[in-house]
Image (cartoon, rainbow, N blue to C red):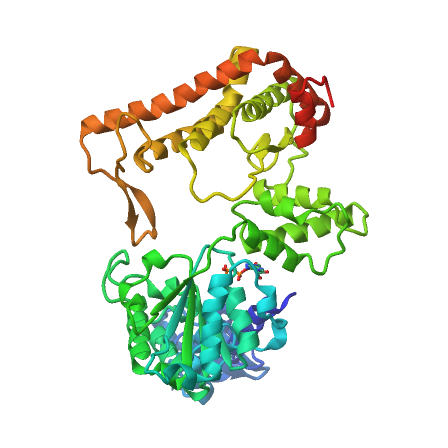
Amino acid sequence: MNASHKKIFVPIMIGFMLLMLFRGLNKPGSSVSMDYSDFLKTVESGSVTRITLQGDDITGVTGQGAFHTFAPEDPELMTLLKSKGVQIWAKPVNGDSWVRTILSWVPMLLMIGVWIFFMRRMQGGNGNLLSFGKSKARLMSDSRGKVTFEDVAGIDEARDELQEIIDFLKDPGKFTRLGGRIPKGVLLVGAPGTGKTLLARAIAGVAGVPFFSLSGSDFVEMFVGIGASRVRDLFNQGKKNAPCIIFVDEIDAVGRRRGSGVGGGHDEKEQTLNQLLVEMDGFESNEGVILIAATNRPDVLDPALLRPGRFDRQVVVSVPDIMGRLGILKVHVRNNPLSDDVDLKVLARGTPGFTGADIENMVNEAALMAARRGKDQLEMVDLEDAKDKVMMGPERQSMIISDAEKKAMAYREAGHALVARLLPGTDPIHKVTIIPRGQSFGLTQQLPMSEKHAYPKSDLQNSICILMGGRAAEEIIFNTQTTGTGDDIRKASELARKMVCEFGMSKELGPLAFGKEEGQVFLGRAFGRQREYSRMTVQKIDEAVRGIVVEAYKKALALIKDNLDTLGNIAMALLEKETLNRGDIDELMAGGQSP
Ligand code: ADP
């Protein structure tokens, strides 16, 4: 029985025992029970000397001892008793015993007990009912391992910005000398896993001031007013410990735009937010309390939170770029023995869109994989496999794929790879595989030479053409269309639509943007496009999107038709080896039969 079972079990046992006791007390002492007809006979025989009537209960004594019985409504009973000269005592139904009075309280006491029990559980078991409105801020200490700025890589701007805050806490005079005002609050904005919490912990590590940390959801309780009182308590704690830093993670849990809740009204969250705003106004940053909050949804925050004097500084913690990823990789492989073939630069290039958390996860997976494979060092294959696992989920080894299906997969991937190689100006191919992972059945991965922030139109057209390579190959080879290319088709259509509607890259429609993303506050997510153009334009947009995709498809068809031999060679090699790398593809393109 585990602890939580015990917690429930004990009150139930106590209740049960009390119930038994109650029943036991209700029973008349050690008298024998008698049926009514026997009782009448006994009275008639004259051996009953005295009885006590209490409601329907009859207790009495005969020459043999005490007895008890239960009397039905019998009008003749009294006459009989009187005729036999039995002494009759009558008692009120409820009795007069003090035990009964106490026992009548038992159910009530039990209920109170159960209530207290649940209250304590709701409080996370910290026991004290009166600490409801106290903040749950934890003073961050070294218990989780000290983090310093050395552990944070790839987000230098954010780091520098926060470094300034630390400098201020160490020497406020330096900044206020010229009349400057130190920000009261810093809002860290960034996608999940980009290192916001890590940054905050690093500040705690280096600032050398007390650091209180709590999550926005800690304010949220069932009872109105609790959140607000927690905010008050948090700031009181902060002021007492000044100079200090208060870190609120996931502030969107309390800081949502007011009046946006479904059902609206002045609810608990609004009260909490109002209190937060009041407290932020109420202290001077020179007092040395600095509030740092983190969120990945700045768009749903109440504008009042963001205005100067509150979170007047927003620090964007962005998804790292290629150099950032390299830095983060270096941080995380510090404690892993690496084999000589590991090239962190290639890994950094091959992990676009990875956040710090993804990279940490990847290195960890690689270490586990290497251990499972009985190695004493992490090799490049381990890291590559771990990367694919993090990107697309684990290999689906149990999936049964028929030979025919495998062949189709091989041709589809070969189609992607071939088109990618034939189109001028595309990124080199890193890997082609037909091992199914997560949701995808195969993959052709290209490796960008450098990170781009603005893509030329030709790149986008090429991407669509490569996506179409799979469908083109299956059309040419098998003369059919399968659902296997559905995902490519969806991606290609989305990209083409973006080209037309967002990037203004369509010849027919010109450099215009159509529609804008519409955010719905209470659902907290983008909710579609707002239409601000005519129906005619809708038709033109559809035509333009279709034009882009169809053109790319035709191009893919032509490229593949002209290089059918190479397509076949790549597909055969894939069937044989399942995964081909850049060198294999190069060789096949140069006319080699099979690597
Ligand atoms: P967030 O709070 O932004 O969701 P975290 O700070 O919790 O993300 O990041 C999770 C983990 O990812 C961290 O513990 C750290 O190991 C790793 N990580 C994230 N960003 C970085 C970075 N810039 N440098 C080093 N490690 C990072």
> What is the count of numbered marks?
0
Closer to us: 208 or 425: 425
Q: Is residue 308 above or below residue 532?
A: below
Which of the 4 quarters of the picture holds residue 220? bottom left
- Where does the image place residue 73, in percent across and percent down from the top left? 36, 69
Does any portion of residue 113 appear in the rendered image?
A: no
Quadrant of the frame with the N terminus: bottom right
Q: Position of residue 333 (x, y in %)?
A: 68, 56
The image shows residue 194 at horizontal and vertical percentages of 51, 57
**In the image, residue 530 above or below residue 566:** below
Report if residue 304 is visible in the image: yes
Identify whether 553 is placed above or below 71: above
Give the quadrant of the C terminus.
Answer: top right
Residue 344 place in picture, x, y as percent: 66, 49
Q: Nearer the viewer, residue 104 or 87?
A: 104
- Left or right: 453 with respect to 307? right
Q: Nearer the viewer, residue 319 or 512?
A: 512
Residue farthest along the left direction in this orientation: 534
| Residue at the far front in the pictured view | 178
Residue in view at x 20 percent, y 38 percent: 532
Figure quadrant, ligand 1: bottom right
Residue at 46% across, 81% down: 169
Q: Is residue 270 left or right of residue 442?
A: left
Residue 412 lies left or right of residue 57; in this view the side is right
Look at 45% across and 75% down and name the residue there: 165
